[in-house]
Image: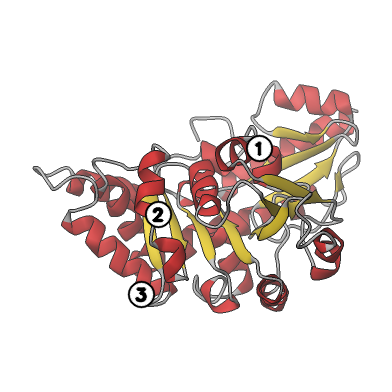
Amino acid sequence: MSHAPCFASDNYAGVHPLVMAALARANDGPARAYGADALTEAARARIKEELGENAEPFFVFLGTAANVLALSAMTRPHHAVLCAETAHINVDECGAPERHLGAKLMSVPTPDGKLTPALLRPLLMHLGNEHHNQPRVVSIAQATELGTLYAPEEVRALADFAHENGMFLHMDGARLGNAAAALGLSLRGASADLGIDALSFGGTKNGLMFGEAVVFFRAELARDFPYLRKQGLQLCSKMRFIAAQFLALLENGLWRENAANANAMAQLLAEKLSGAPGVEIAQKPQTNAVFARLAPAVIERLQARFAFYTWDYEQNLVRFMTSFATTQAEVEAFASAVRAEALAG
């Protein structure tokens, strides 16, 4: 191990070797631009195989762009997007959804990062009232920003609730692979089969160099998306390099292998830290995030040696993230350092 273990984010991880090899193969001579190439056609077909024939995928560079552009296909400026208070679109996208959509985000406090129909119902009291933004989209993250998971029946309940009230259901699937692996589901079983209307399908956090896919499950939402993508600065001229990565990710279940390793390493880290004096595991990890409480001085000393984020400064809550590249040796070395620093107080 030639580098210090890193537990800041799965975005810190490098590129999976099979994905890097796919990029090298894609770099063999010229190809038609803007997605008119054979690799993009093949990758779109492969995603349809995974998510269903009614899936319409479009490649973009970034997760924030995937979320904003997916929502743009479903909203107009007088609409509102309902989301958890902790949602990435509400907290970590620098106001990009509201700036580019012109629509309002209406956030809901949740105990675990998960929305329910009961939490959302009060936000519908002004439906039909021209003085208020009209709820149009429910946006959920799977897995959530708190590392929690929606059970399939919970997603289905939200889809039914949204559709019964004239709304769409969007899933931020930046870590969909981790969620599907943890639930023992296929990608389709964790998304399309549950009634969602649009998906931001993440690749970067699961071994890609760059690239996400916006996937619609309603033809009318996909119809104008090529123009929205172009206006949104996300039409990649050399799209084959995004497509090649998704082909590699979906080949022989690499997405599941990567996600399963990340999840398993988070479980191992939680086990290694469980019961350690001065360390409180805030919740049992469900995917690849471990949340723990440490003394401020311990956090400061550890962050001088290792990369990880303080999640809540008032509660001294930190987040440790694992990735496809995290090894057992890295987990053990990091856990030993955390235990030693916490014991020192």
Q: Position of residue 244 (x, y in %)?
A: 27, 53
Q: How is the image coloured?
A: secondary structure
Query: Is residue 288 rendered to the left or right of residue 124?
Result: left
Q: Which residue is mark 1?
A: 92
Query: Is residue 142 rendered to the left or right of residue 337?
Result: left
> Could one spot residue 16 in this view of the protein?
no
* Residue positioned 58% across, 45% down in the render: 329
Amino acid type shown at disc 3: Glu
Of the residues tagged 1 and 2, which is closer to the observer? Answer: 2
Give the class, few, some or many, for how many residues have Cα within 10 Å of label 1's Cα (few <14, many ≥20).
Answer: few
Circle on res. 225: 2
Q: Position of residue 246 (x, y in %)?
A: 35, 56
Spatial CA distance of label 1 from label 3 is 32 Å
Of residues 17 and 205, the one nearer the viewer is: 205
Q: Quadrant of the C terminus?
A: top right
Amino acid type shown at disc 1: Asp
Spatial CA distance of label 2 from label 3 is 21 Å
Element under disc 1 = loop
Give the class, few, some or many, for how many residues have Cα within 10 Å of label 2's Cα (few <14, many ≥20).
Answer: some
Q: Which residue is mark 3?
A: 49
Circle on res. 210: none
Element under disc 2 = helix
* Residue positioned 12% across, 47% down in the render: 31
Of residues 63 and 167, the one nearer the viewer is: 167
